[in-house]
Image (spheres, rainbow, N blue to C red):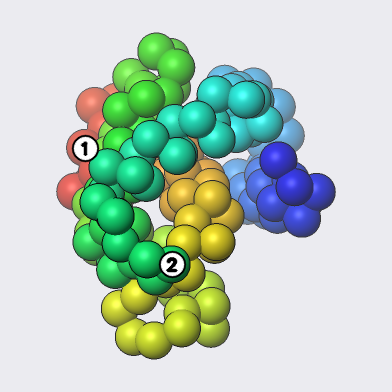
Amino acid sequence: ISSKRKKRMESKRSEKATKTGQSDGANAALLERLEAYLSDEAFPNHLSKSLSFAVMGQPSIITDQMLTKTIQGVVKSLPTKLKHTIPEPDQEFVCTSLKSYESKRPKDGCWCVSDVGELVSVVLVSMAVSVERFREMGGYEVDPTTL
């Protein structure tokens, strides 16, 4: 995992802890497990397989739908504890999570394949933070349409 991505994940975790008044505990455990997965050698393998399936031979640019399918494929490959905690994001969640990355788009509705690893990480961290916030509000059964 790149140091830039690691700093961004740590920043999100710090920001979340500040907002909720928590620094450790059950909520931090989910982000720590996700961070460990994103740093593990399994993540690039799962990303590569999911991306290959989603793009089906396309060149260096992928559509929003291909990116969403890639992310959903990675979620299906998550380790068991994470898979049962983090639901598959839908297209709307992916687009909302990546609003601040719009400047990386080479054209509307498309992404560079070289940015996919970073984009997947951002969406997964956003989903993990959303799950934590949902649970803080008393939710237990996580459905991506409620996040």
Looking at the image, residue 82 lies above or below residue 52: above
Instruction: Please tell me which residue is depicted at 39% across the width and 86% down the height of the picture.
Output: 107
Using the rendered image of the protein, determine whether residue 9 is visible from the camera's viewpoint: yes
Q: Nearer the viewer, residue 41 or 127?
A: 41
Q: Nearer the viewer, residue 73 or 61?
A: 61
Rendering coords of residue 125 (x, y %):
52, 45
Looking at the image, residue 9 lies above or below residue 60: above
Q: Residues within 10 Å of mark 1 (few under 14, many from 20)?
A: some
Question: Left or right: where does residue 21 sit relative to residue 34?
Answer: right
Rendering coords of residue 20 (x, y %):
60, 45
What amino acid type is highlighted by mark number 1?
Asp
Q: Residues within 10 Å of mark 2 (few under 14, many from 20)?
A: few
Residue carrying label 1: 143
Instruction: Please tell me which residue is depicted at 27% across the width and 42% down the height of the picture.
Output: 53
Question: Left or right: where does residue 102 sit relative to residue 143?
Answer: right
Which mark, by number, is residue 60? 2
Using the rendered image of the protein, determine whether residue 138 is visible from the camera's viewpoint: no
Secondary structure at numbered mark 1: loop
The quarter of the displayed image where residue 52 is located: top left
Rendering coords of residue 83 (x, y %):
36, 22
Looking at the image, residue 41 lies above or below residue 74: above
Split into 4 quadrants, where in the image is the N terminus?
top right
Question: Left or right: where does residue 118 sit relative to residue 54?
Answer: right
Instruction: Please tell me which residue is depicted at 57% across the width and 55% down the height of the picture.
Output: 118
Secondary structure at numbered mark 2: loop
